[in-house]
Image (cartoon, rainbow, N blue to C red):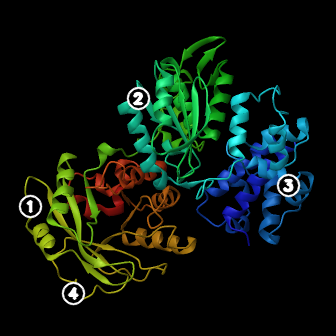
Amino acid sequence: MPSNAEVARTFRAIADLLDILGEKFKPEAYRRAARSIDSLTEDLAKVAARNELRTIPGVGEAIEEKTRELLSTGHLAYYDRLLKEVPPGLLEIMRLPGLGPKTARRFWTELGIEGPQELSSAIAAGRLEGVKGFGPKKIDQIRAALSPAVPGASARRPIEEAYPIATRILKALRDEAPVERAEIAGSFRRCQETVGDLDLLATSNAPEKVFDLFSALPEVREVRLRGGTKETVVLTNGLQVDLRVVEPAAFGAALQYFTGSKDHNVTLRTLARDRGLKINEYGVFRGDERIAGRTEEEVYATLGLSWIPPELRVDRGEIDAAARNAVPHVVSEADLRGEFHLHLPSQATVRDLERALADARERRYAYVGIVVAGVGADGKAFALPSAVRDRVAAERSRGLCIVRVVEAGPGPLPKSLAGGGAELTLLRPVGSASPTPIPAGVRGIVHVGPGNAPTETLREWIDSASTARLFIEVGPGPDRLDSNWARVALEAHVALSVPTGLGLNEFDPTRPIGLGFARRAGAEAKDVVNSAREFGATVRRGPSAR
């Protein structure tokens, strides 16, 4: 039986084929259904068995019928028929960087080109020259796209993989380029679990100098496109980055537009049209007059909406909430008061400990839970070096509460770790085993997520956490809850713990991505255990924080 991801992938492929065939509205319908199915945290087959497929956003009668056919047979006659109507080479063209199904259709219908080799020959023969929409820079871009792919490049990658390089590029622009403002937009700003490319926006009086610095960064492999306001580059790891320099009066509108999501923006445009307005990346317009655009806040305000955090812009009721001034106050960096689960390196030194504690004091945290011993993913016991453990036990100065933490496996804690005077015991599931009776004294669950537990097992862990009044850690990586599963946990009245990345450098994704996933799940400060002002109060209340 096809998985959720396989069904979504089929619907995206159908959308691309329909675009190539010139359909106007159907492609977006299939893409919306695919996005909704991708975000499900339950097996699609179970939703179908309850006859609830149409409760999924974007799934109407026709797509429900095709979903059932896919789930029952593993095939879809409609998809097979579309494949026969489109030359296979067009699918290869469509997947080239910077191209897509609509451009592939133009090659096919206007120039008779049906594959990459024919496209390369057409460029060499000058057949694209003078064709509307294919200027010299666009032709150079296509020529570059036909070159061998970057080794290791992929369509999408985990956000934690993209985070270090994205933040280094943003820092370089802010520190070294003549920009007034610079931000990252797109799925990265929404803290989506995966990103396909990066969208950067900046304001500057000297865009050429900004582009010169941007293209000279050591992370840049090649420049694909450069115009008066936009430059597209490919990084050494294959990630495509678009940098746009916009005027200050349009920066907020551009930031909103390029942040997305697409579904969110479509609903906003419909709302604007109903009010006699037009909204795009250049601003909000009444006729030819721009009435907003400098900030995101004024863009939303002209539509009668309060500002919506980027992580919530998914067209799941956030726009209606903004119209009622009822958008959730999602947890912020300022809400975090401490850390429960600080892992120091296995060969940590006292200096490593001091660096992390200095970071905690600089953030004005009230408490830090330091893992001094436990059971690792391999089921074997581990402990910090004795000098560090002694320092943890002795450290009680300058108003920071230091908490000794032990990680237990599902079974009894090894005698070598028991009775060590720890104030907090966390449960670390080993492998993908289902929950067993949770040992007494455990207050939270760490290292359980979609990467090391199948769907049903992960649900069992969440249900066990709810019953035992435990919290679960959210954050980047396959062994913590992502935003979709964090939302499931919140619905089950399970509180979250957000990792803070104490002692790690500014390019480490642990702190911002963990917080972003919690925000994307809709968590407020009351839903996050390490937002409590005192360590004791946090541990006692557990998921009753909701």
User: Looking at the image, is mark 3 or mark 4 nearer the viewer?
Assistant: 3
Quarter location, residue 175:
top left
Q: Residue at x 51, y 71 (%)?
A: 458
Amino acid under disc 4: Ser
Q: Look at the image and tell me whether residue 23 can be seen.
A: no
Spatial distance from mark 2 to mark 1, Cα to Cα?
A: 45 Å
First reached walking from the N terminus: tag 3 or tag 4: 3
Q: Which residue is mark 3?
A: 88
Spatial distance from mark 2 to mark 3, Cα to Cα?
A: 44 Å
Q: Which residue is mark 1?
A: 396
Q: Look at the image and tell me whether residue 145 can be seen.
A: yes
- Percent position (x, y) of residue 435? 45, 79
Amino acid under disc 2: Ala
Amino acid under disc 1: Arg
Left or right: residue 424 versus residue 436 is: left
Quadrant in which the C terminus appears: bottom left
First reached walking from the N terminus: tag 1 or tag 3: 3
- CB atoms at circles 1 and 3 under 8 Å apart? no
First reached walking from the N terminus: tag 1 or tag 4: 1
Query: SS for tag 1?
Result: loop
Residues packed near mark 4 inside 10 Å, few (<14), some (14 to 19) or many (20 plus): few
Identify whether 260 is placed above or below 279: below
